[in-house]
Amino acid sequence: MARQSFDEKLARLKRLELENPSPDGLLELRQALAGSSSLLAAKGARIAAKWGLRDLKPEIAAAFHRYLQNPVKTDPGCHAKLAAVETLNALDCPDADVLLRGIRHIQLEPSFGPPVDTAELLRAACAFGLYRLGHPELLCEMVTLLMDSKTAPRRAAVRVLTDLGREVSEMLLRMKALQGDTEPEILGDCLSGLLAISPARSLKFAEQFLEAEDPQVADEAALAIGNSRLKEAFGILRDFRERNVLPSIKRTLLLPIALTRSNDAFAMLLEVLRSEHRDNAIAAIEALAVYGINPDSREQIRIAASSRDDRLIREAFEKRIVQGLR
């Protein structure tokens, strides 16, 4: 029999993915996992996850460890190692040794500029695996990931700490929020996590970030407060908007206000739509879209938009509220 090329093997695995599990298919997956191609091994692992083949855990773990050897050459892009970890997680059979080695793995690969770390998604996936495993070193590893140079591991650590929901998680998220981050979204994740873990204690803490010099940080704080849906959230955001004179801030606060989903927020946004400057009115329509699925609310928004003798406002209503539901 002629030896199959890489393309032929990959095409066969893609066809196999569409089939039902079979003894022949299982043999092909084992061959892919044991082979020298990291891309074929990754594909084989993902098919194993789709088929729910928990019996392949030893082969998947072995592939992970094999591709840790000379990884830049054997597994560029970390495809096989990432697929192995995600598959073990999906099959609910995470391997502590795999996860600990993976969460500490940094893979610097050549690029046109400085070397690029291609293992960031691997470290993030290992964080979720350790959490699901309830590993005793979880918190230590999360502290390390909070300081990771890449975004995905930092976000994973924040999410894990939020889901963990302990007081120590709250303290770590507070420290991270106070330290700041190059990615404002991560600060927003921290504040959302804090408001989920300890709402009463965290609302005042989150409120201070509304005054941040960086407008993106202030936006993330407002979104976190709005998404918390705490009964005090609307009043905090409304009062902060009333204190501000900058039109840009007045506009960006409308969506967080809408996210509180309170009746007072809905009434306020309708008033903005009816009476404030066109730019604010259009921003209010964007924010009111979160209420648009309700027919009664949608009709009130339509009436408010129609009360303005402004074609652009009416067009915004049609595009965002009416067409947005289709």
Image (cartoon, rainbow, N blue to C red):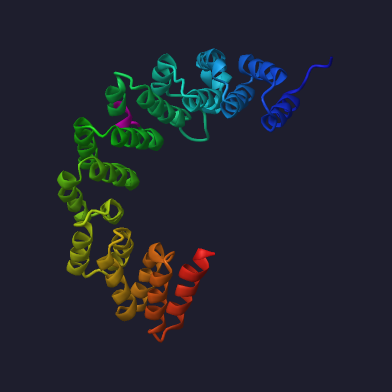
Can you give x and y, in whole percent of width and height, for residue 25 in the image?
69, 21
Residue nearer the viewer, 94 or 65: 94
Above-or-below relation of 150 to 269: above
Please state which of residues 114 and 41 is positioned toward the viewer in this rendering: 41
Residue 151 horizontal side relative to residue 267, left or right: right
Q: How many marks do you count on the picture? A: 0
Residue 6 placement (x, y as % from top left): 72, 24
Residue located at (46% from left, 20% from top): 93
Kindly indicate the quadrant of the structure image that contains residue 270. Answer: bottom left
Confirm whether the magenta stretch covers residue 287.
no
Residue 174 is situated, as x and y percent measured from the top left of the image, at 20, 39
Residue at x 22% of width, y 57% of height: 233
Q: Main secondary structure of the magenta part?
A: helix
Which residue is the extreme one toward the right? 1
Residue at x 53%, y 16% (from the top left corner) = 57
Magenta region, residue range? 144-148
Residue 147 lies in magenta, yes or no? yes
Q: Nearer the viewer, residue 274 or 103?
A: 274
